[in-house]
Each structure stands twice: as structure tokens, then as C-alpha cells.
Image (tube, rainbow, N blue to C red):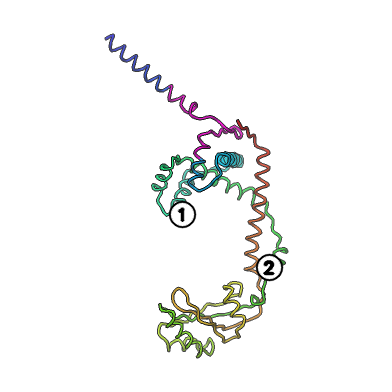
């Protein structure tokens, strides 16, 4: 009986020691290097981020990893202030997308991370911060971006070339099949007999695997530059030289042609560029202000 009590007492003591050591291990194994608004960043997090950098070919090292973690802590803190939350499902979806981009499944991606000594939470923590910051950008930064339509009009007008000032109604004549040399020869025969869009289909019936497709209305700015330049030199009833395309040989016939300076497509590209530039500047300012308001303590 005494031996049984003694055995249980020793067993309880051993379990207590093991639990005490286990509880103390995280504290002993990690040290806090930076605190961001009370959120600690440990040396283990930094070393893990350095390993992730190495996997990506990023040479930022310890300093770069530390600053990225500081930025993410700031971003997550700001997201929380704005009431933004990121679900585990969103993180899982982002993780799956990364795996697909790498042409592997999620199990393979986990295995790749494990082989490089990277905890899966290291990547998921970064994904959480990125998703949260995207939401902050949409909610708080994008509404501050202003783009002048007058400036876009002026810039677009200055970029319009002479060959881009036309509006067309086009038909495409396609000689379907492999063997571009043979198909090109037939296309040139078709071209020499072409007498306008009204007889385009009838003429195609004299050739094997020739199709006439209504392209419809297109402005020059919607077309590849080389084709737009060639079309600019043609009158109504003209047809372009044969071009080898993926499914055969193609030509474009001009059914209608009018002078029409359309800045829509040029403006769209300029608006995208201006928006990206303005958003980048606004984001940098927002982050700078955020850093001034954030309590960051380096140990």
C-alpha cells in the first residue's frame, strides 16, 4: 500500500515537472525583439520569415524580415481599428491560390515549406496581414485618390497618332488549317479577287475551309498597332495582307471607315496608370502617418 502511494506520488511529481518545463519552454526558446502597439515580434518569428525570404529568393535578411513583420503588425492593428476581420477561409483560399500559381496542391506546398524548415503559420500570418491591408486600402485609402479627367483628356489627345483616328466596320476572312505557306497562297488568291464586303462570303465559297466572320465595329485604338497602321492606309473595300494566326491565316476587310477620334481606350490605360501611381503615393503617405501613430519598441 505504501509502495503504491509512493509510486503515485513520484508519478505525479514527474508529470508536474514535465508540465512546468513545457510551459516554460516558449519563454526560454523565444525572446521579444520588437513590440508594436503591445504585440510582440519574437526572434523565432524573424528567423522563420528569413527562411521564407530565402525560399522566395528575397535577400532582405534579418533586417528586412523584422521590418516586414513590423509593417504587418501595424497593418493588422489598423485593420482591427477599422473593424476589419480576416476569416480562416480567406486565408485558406489565398494559400490554395499560391499553391495553384506554383502548379502544386496544398499538401505539396506544405511539404515544401516543411522541407525548408518553415512553419505553415509563417506564410499564413503574412497572408492574413496582406488580406487585411487590402481591405484597409479599399476602405480608407482608395476613396482619397483623385484623378483629373481634364488631365487625362489632355494626355490622351497628345498620345493619339494619325493612324488611330479611324472607326471601322470589319470582316475577317480566315483560311483555317495548318501549313501556313499553302494557306497564305490561297489567301492571296482570295485577296486578288476581293471586290468588297458584300461579296466576301460568295467569294469564300470558291476556297476550301475559308470562313468569313463579322468582326463588327472597332476603333483603331482597339486593334494591334501594326494592323491599325495597315488599315489606316486602306479605303472602304480594301483588305489587309494575310497574317498567320493560331488557327490558320487571317485577313481583315474594311466594310466602313470613318474619321472618329475616340480617346476612350487610351484614357482607360492612362487612368489605370494614374490610379496606380496615385494609390501608391497615397498608400505610402497613409503608412507613414500610421507609423507615427504606432508605438514601436525595439529591444
Query: Residue 167 versus residue 241: which sits nearer the camera?
Result: 241
Q: Where's the C terminus, which quadrant? A: top right
Whether residue 76 is visible, yes or no, is no
The residue tagged 1 is 101
Badge 2 crowding class, 10 Å Cα cut-off, few under 14, some 14 to 19, many 20 or more, is many
Q: Residue visible at 68% across and 47% down?
A: 285
Say if 33 sits above or below 264 in the image.
Answer: above
Instruction: Measuring from the top left, give residue 164's x and y in whole percent.
Output: 64, 75
Q: Position of residue 221 (x, y in %)?
A: 61, 72
Q: Earlier in the sequence, mark 1 or mark 2?
A: 1
Read off the residue under disc 2: 156
- Residue 12: assigned label: none
Please say whether residue 45 is visible from this viewpoint: yes
Q: Residue at x 61, y 75 (%)?
A: 220
**Helix, strand or loop at disc 2?**
helix
Identify the residue at horizontal 67%, vertical 50% (top origin).
282
Q: Residue furthest top?
A: 2
Let me know if residue 39 is in the magenta part. yes
Q: Nearer the viewer, mark 1 or mark 2?
A: 1
**Is residue 30 placed above or below 70 in the rendered structure?**
above
**In which quadrant of the rendered image does the N terminus lie?**
top left
Position of 75 relative to 166 (above/below)? above
Label 1: state its secondary structure: helix
Q: Residues within 10 Å of mark 1 (few under 14, many from 20)?
A: few
Up the image or down, 201 lies above or below 296; here it is below
Real-space Cα distance between discs 1 and 2?
35 Å
- Tell me the magenta residue range: 20-48
Amino acid at each position: 500500500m505504501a509502495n503504491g502511494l509512493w509510486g503515485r506520488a513520484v508519478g505525479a511529481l514527474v508529470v508536474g515537472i514535465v508540465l512546468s518545463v513545457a510551459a516554460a519552454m516558449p519563454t526560454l526558446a523565444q525572446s521579444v525583439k520588437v513590440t508594436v502597439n503591445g504585440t510582440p515580434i519574437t526572434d523565432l518569428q524573424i528567423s522563420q520569415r528569413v527562411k521564407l525570404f530565402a525560399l522566395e529568393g528575397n535577400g532582405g535578411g534579418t533586417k528586412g524580415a523584422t521590418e516586414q513583420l513590423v509593417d504587418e503588425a501595424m497593418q493588422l492593428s489598423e485593420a482591427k481599428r477599422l473593424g476589419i476581420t480576416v476569416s480562416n477561409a480567406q486565408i485558406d483560399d489565398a494559400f490554395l491560390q499560391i499553391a495553384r500559381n506554383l502548379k502544386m496542391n496544398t499538401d505539396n506546398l506544405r511539404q515544401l515549406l516543411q522541407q525548408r524548415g518553415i512553419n505553415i503559420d509563417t506564410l499564413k500570418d503574412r497572408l492574413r496581414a496582406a488580406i487585411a491591408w487590402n481591405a484597409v486600402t479599399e476602405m480608407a485609402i482608395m476613396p482619397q485618390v483623385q484623378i483629373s479627367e481634364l488631365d487625362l483628356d489632355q494626355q490622351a489627345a497628345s498620345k493619339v497618332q494619325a493612324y488611330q483616328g479611324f472607326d471601322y466596320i470589319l470582316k475577317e476572312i480566315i483560311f483555317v488549317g495548318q501549313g501556313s505557306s499553302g494557306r497564305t497562297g490561297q489567301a492571296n488568291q482570295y485577296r486578288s479577287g476581293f471586290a468588297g464586303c458584300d461579296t466576301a462570303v460568295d467569294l469564300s465559297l470558291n476556297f476550301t475551309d475559308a470562313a468569313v466572320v463579322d468582326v463588327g465595329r472597332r476603333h483603331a485604338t482597339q486593334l494591334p498597332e501594326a494592323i491599325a497602321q495597315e488599315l489606316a492606309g486602306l479605303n472602304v473595300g480594301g483588305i489587309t495582307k494575310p497574317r498567320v494566326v493560331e488557327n490558320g491565316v487571317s485577313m481583315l476587310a474594311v466594310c466602313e471607315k470613318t474619321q472618329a477620334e475616340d480617346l476612350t481606350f487610351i484614357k482607360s490605360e492612362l487612368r489605370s496608370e494614374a490610379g496606380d501611381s496615385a494609390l501608391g503615393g497615397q498608400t505610402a503617405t497613409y503608412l507613414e502617418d500610421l507609423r507615427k501613430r504606432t508605438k514601436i519598441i525595439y529591444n
